[in-house]
Image: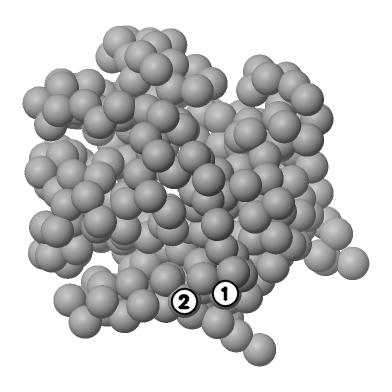
Amino acid sequence: MLHSQLTINCRGKLLSLESPVVMGILNATPDSFFDGGKHAEVTAALHRCEAMLKEGAAIIDVGGMSSRPGADIIDEEEELRRVLPVVEAIVREFPDTVISIDTVRSVVARACVEAGASIVNDISAGRLDPEMYPTVAGLGVPYILMHMKGTPSDMQLDPEYDDVVQEVLDFLIAETGKLRSLGVKDIILDPGFGFGKTVDHNYQLLKNLQVLKMLECPILAGISRKSMICKVLEVNPPAALNGTTALHMVALQQGAGILRVHDVKEAVEVIKLWQQLESV
């Protein structure tokens, strides 16, 4: 039986993944699909961060550029202006927090890690910045490797696969090899739900998520309030919490070790119920 890596080294702090953990989403963006603009101002972001930590978040994921379908790429200076003060404030107010920086840019990743972030979460798998992989290797931090077909501006136009599970797996195997060759030790796999996939593609990936275990890396599931839920239930993102919770249980049963979520309390409860289920 294959076993995923059970700890990741976040700049000297070992984060245990023996049991699944929750990553709380902190959007410092005015145009996120669910909570855009709410947490862009530093004080508001700190309040949100504190609430998520109290609810049990093990990681806070700070992002300054929306990756929703059709989103525009903002310039580097604007992204830094959004995220760097938030990272610095979290480090100052909650110094033990494991912070991930959600960015496709190596310059932003470096600046935020130097400010105290300790994980890089890159939806582009280095495709949008050839310096990303070497930068992460040099920084010595965990890297979240995600599959995306296309870019946020075009990924949902008409995504096609012969076999979505096989293609995503092949991609993650190849990219993991590149990262390992550069010396990146801690790699987290994200199949990229909603990133260049139809509703059916997303459910095929979720149903077969356990195949990613063959890489022996932690698996991250980012399905919170996404269109794969909204389209099936015919609801908008604010009404998609119940559907999110239902699919989180499936993700855990399929081997997810990290749930990336908007709603920390509910995700923590799902993990507790899953643990009870597993223990009997």
Q: Residue at x 47, y 76 (%)?
A: 170
For this rendering, which residue is in front, 77 or 148?
148
Q: Residue at x 49, y 18 (%)?
A: 35
Look at the picture and state if 176 lies above or below 22: below
**Rendering coords of residue 164 (x, y %):** 59, 65
Location of mark 2 (residue): 170
The alpha-carbon separation of the residues under discs 2 and 1 comes to 6 Å
Q: Residue at x 30, y 10 (%)?
A: 41
Q: Badge 2: how crowded within 10 Å, few (<14), some, or many (20+)? A: few
- Give the structural element (helix, strand or loop) at label 2: helix
**Rendering coords of residue 250 (x, y %):** 76, 54
- Farthest residue to the right: give it: 280
**Rendering coords of residue 83 (x, y %):** 23, 27
Q: Residue at x 36, y 78 (%)?
A: 174
Residue 166: mark in rendering: 1
Decide: marks 2, 1 in contact (CB < 8 A)?
yes
- 187 vs 247, left or right, is left
Amino acid of disc 1: Gln
Of the 4 image quadrants, the one containing the N terminus is bottom right
Amino acid of disc 2: Asp
Look at the picture and state if 26 lies above or below 162: above
**Rendering coords of residue 117 (x, y %):** 25, 43
- 38 vs 242, left or right, is left
Of the 4 image quadrants, the one containing the C terminus is bottom right
